[in-house]
Amino acid sequence: MSVTPPRIFVTGISTEVGKTVASAVLVRALKADYWKPIQCGDLHDLECEKVLAWADCTESEAHPSKHLLEHPMSPHAAAQRSGLTLALGDFVRPNPTKTLVIEGAGGVLVPLNDTDTVADLIQPGDQVVVVSRHYLGSINHSLLTAEVLKARGIQGFWVFNGDPNPETESVILSKTGWPFLGRLLPEPVIDAACIARYAQDWGDRWAQITADPTVSDTK
């Protein structure tokens, strides 16, 4: 019987927290394909193109987004501005024979329409990586994100974006019980060499914590 390769859904505690960089690291580390179901704003700087350039992995492919919306707004509002109404049925996943990294838009409760949110794009069996960037209020946003996902029976993994902050990170890890996957440090330039440095550590860590999810210490 064939086994479906891993599907990794990358989300965040808010917008602009590092989801695209984290996605690129995972694509490089796992030699995965990439898919962003919906992108809103700046269609001259597509995230799929950035991820492929940063990951610099000839084995990886970026699958086309279902919706590219020009307005830098929540998907439901950006769609309305373009005369569209989004529906869950729009988002038919690609089905590559390798790991697929899926990047959400904004946070998990960002609306797609009057009923559905980004969280509804997460499917049973997905492994969910949550990026938490350090800022005042990030503990609250992180724990609220975890509560939403836990209510849906979803186990997550944490990526922290920023210099180490033990006081913040220890609270998030202890209250959620979710393992730490990796850290993104402030970088002067994000490029393929930068992503490759992270990918080695994250790939090793991914293998470790998916084999033993009780591993949760930060480094």
Image: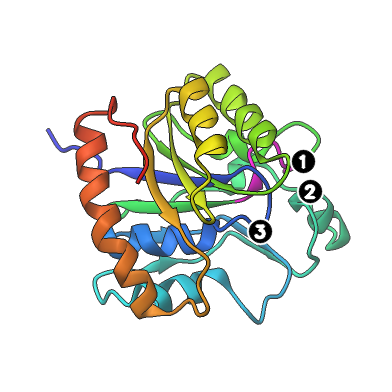
Of mark 3 and mark 2, the one earlier in the sequence is: 3
| Span highlighted in magenta in the image | 105-112
Residue flagged by tag 1: what amino acid is it? Asn
Residues marked 3 and 2 touching at CB (< 8 Å)? no
Q: Is residue 136 above or below residue 173?
A: below
Horizontal and vertical percent position of residue 164: 48, 50
As for residue 107 lying within the magenta part, the answer is yes
Q: Position of residue 183 (x, y in %)?
A: 43, 53
Q: Residue at x 37, y 33 (%)?
A: 179
In this figure, which residue is indicated by the disc labeled 1?
Answer: 113
User: Is residue 99 toward the left or the right of residue 191 in the image?
Assistant: left
The mark nearer the N terminus, 1 or 2, is 2
Are there few (<14), some (14-19), or many (20+) residues within 10 Å of tag 3? few
Can you tell which quarter of the image residue 141 is in?
Answer: top right
Q: Quadrant of the N terminus?
A: top left
Mark 3 vs mark 2, CA separation in Å: 18 Å
Tell me if label 1 and label 2 are in contact, CB under 8 Å: yes
Which picture quadrant has residue 56? bottom left
Name the disc covering residue 16, or none: 3
Q: What kind of residue is marked 3?
A: Glu
User: Front-most of 109 and 124?
Assistant: 109
Q: Say whether disc 3 or disc 1 marks the residue closer to the N-terminus.
A: 3
Quadrant in the picture for residue 31: bottom left
Which residue lies at the image location 37% right of the left edge and 62% below the top edge? 25
Q: Label 1: state its secondary structure.
A: loop
Which residue is most to the left?
Answer: 1
| Kind of residue sitting beneath label 2 | His
Please tell me how crowded label 2 is: few (under 14), some (14-19), or many (20+) other residues with Cα within 10 Å.
many
